[in-house]
Image (cartoon, helix red, strand yellow):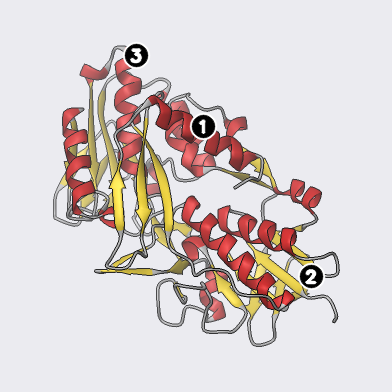
């Protein structure tokens, strides 16, 4: 039997997990190729600690070129066109055909969806986080507004984590009494993907730390100075530092491929992550896996990794003509740092029978140790 070609688009959590899993289960006659426009990628989950100096930029990156050590072909290129009918992908480095395709291109940030947002700051994105880090290093007093523009977003706990990490950092500096922190979200309660109990607990945790939470208020515009935000509920607030979470959208090349149809994200079969086209899979932030009650699997790296492993096993079972793996179960946990020394866990099984079974643990030092090990494992391509 001639060798098969497995092509993975995107070198984030999901893409790496799919490529790594498939390569480990296939013999050398089969080809596994991963394409990403960046050789060096960064762990966005480290950004809340990066912006207050608890992580260094060098600690948050990994080179996809190292995948060659695992027998995976890495190509640094821009993806220009995805042709699922012709089973090929055009890139700036040529055209690649495939037998199995894994689309793991994540979500793009639409910085212009909120007029004026470019004049403010953000921690979504490596360059944006470093710019905010420089600003925070000299921030002494005043009001900080963290404004979410729309849902869904990557790493749903991140706006609340960032607020609590800022609270801790200013307390450590001895300037917390001179700083007011406000968080604005579009949802009626925080962390909607985790359910009402998690929202109640998180709201209390924010309140206990003197962090003001404003619900049902999405960022709509930032003024030319970058210091005043207008919200969907008609309110506005001036601040000394405005930090926005941008609108997330399907990458243009994915939208143009037609894989999503008229949906905002690619619909997939929950058990297999397969799209409407046989042997074409969509994993991670680019897809939509419903969990009931209007919710979906969170757009977070740990879930993308689990999806990637499931798809990697499924592809190899089809190539090797073996039993398919267990269905994807939507199990995973996100970290929610409350400080530089303590972290909680948010998660559970989102595709459990009867509905998601999700909880939020209390922040502990051992939780932070788990978070640090997770980051180390990510850098070493164990995740």
Q: Is residue 306 above or below residue 155?
A: below
- Residue 34 in view: yes
Residues 303 and 254: in front is 303
Gap between marks 3 and 2, in whole Å? 52 Å
Question: What residue lies at 63% left-to-right and 75% top-to-bottom?
Answer: 323
Q: Position of residue 270 (x, y in %)?
A: 44, 72
Q: Residue furthest left?
A: 234
Q: Position of residue 230 (x, y in %)?
A: 22, 50
Q: Earlier in the sequence, mark 3 or mark 2?
A: 2
**Residue 263 numbered mark, or none:** none
Gap between marks 1 and 2, in whole Å? 39 Å
Residues 84 and 200: in front is 200
For label 1, count other residues whose C-alpha is less than 10 Å away and answer few (under 14), some (14-19) or many (20+): some
Left or right of residue 88, residue 27 in this image? right
Q: Position of residue 116 (x, y in %)?
A: 35, 50
Gap between marks 3 and 1, in whole Å? 23 Å
Which mark's residue is nearer the viewer, 1 or 2?
1
Q: Earlier in the sequence, mark 3 or mark 1?
A: 3
The residue carrying mark 1 is 372
The residue carrying mark 2 is 94
The residue carrying mark 3 is 173
Q: Is residue 34 above or below residue 219?
A: below
Q: How many marks?
A: 3
Quadrant into which the N terminus falls? bottom right
Q: Earlier in the sequence, mark 1 or mark 2?
A: 2
Question: What residue lies at 41% left-to-right and 59% top-to-bottom?
Answer: 248
Q: Quadrant of residue 33?
A: bottom right
Q: Is residue 235 above or below residue 364?
A: below
């Amino acid at each position: 039997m001639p060798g098969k070609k497995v092509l993975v688009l995107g070198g984030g959590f999901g893409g790496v997990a799919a490529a790594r899993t498939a390569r480990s289960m296939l013999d050398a006659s089969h080809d596994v190729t991963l394409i990403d426009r960046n050789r060096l990628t960064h762990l966005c989950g480290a950004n809340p600690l990066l912006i207050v100096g608890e992580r260094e930029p060098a600690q948050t990156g990994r080179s996809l070129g190292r995948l060659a050590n695992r027998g995976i072909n890495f190509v640094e290129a821009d993806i220009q066109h995805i042709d699922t009918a012709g089973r090929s992908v055009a890139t700036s480095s040529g055209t690649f055909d495939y037998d199995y395709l894994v689309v793991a291109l994540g979500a793009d940030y639409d910085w212009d969806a909120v007029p004026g947002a470019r004049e403010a700051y953000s921690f979504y994105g490596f360059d944006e986080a470093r710019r905010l880090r420089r600003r925070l290093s000299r921030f002494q007093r005043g009001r900080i507004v963290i404004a979410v523009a729309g849902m869904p977003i990557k790493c749903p706990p991140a706006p609340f984590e960032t607020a609590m990490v800022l609270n801790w950092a200013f307390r450590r500096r001895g300037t917390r009494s001179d700083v007011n922190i406000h968080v604005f979200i579009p949802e009626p309660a925080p962390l909607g993907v985790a359910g009402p109990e998690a929202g109640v607990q998180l709201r209390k945790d924010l309140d206990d730390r003197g962090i003001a939470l404003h619900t049902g208020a999405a960022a709509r515009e930032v003024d030319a100075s970058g210091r005043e935000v207008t919200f969907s509920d008609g309110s506005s607030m001036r601040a000394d530092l405005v930090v926005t979470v941008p609108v997330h959208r399907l990458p243009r090349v994915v939208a143009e491929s037609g894989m999503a149809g008229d949906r905002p994200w690619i619909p997939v079969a929950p058990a297999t992550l397969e799209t409407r086209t046989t042997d074409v899979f969509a994993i991670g932030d680019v897809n939509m896996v419903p969990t009931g009650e209007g919710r979906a699997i969170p757009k977070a790296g740990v879930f993308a990794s689990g999806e990637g492993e499931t798809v990697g096993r499924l592809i190899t079972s089809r190539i090797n003509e073996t039993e398919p793996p267990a269905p994807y179960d939507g199990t995973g946990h996100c970290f929610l740092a409350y400080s530089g020394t303590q972290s909680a866990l948010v998660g559970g099984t989102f595709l459990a029978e009867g509905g998601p079974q999700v909880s939020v643990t209390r922040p502990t030092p051992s939780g932070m140790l788990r978070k640090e090990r997770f980051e180390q494992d990510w850098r070493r391509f164990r995740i």
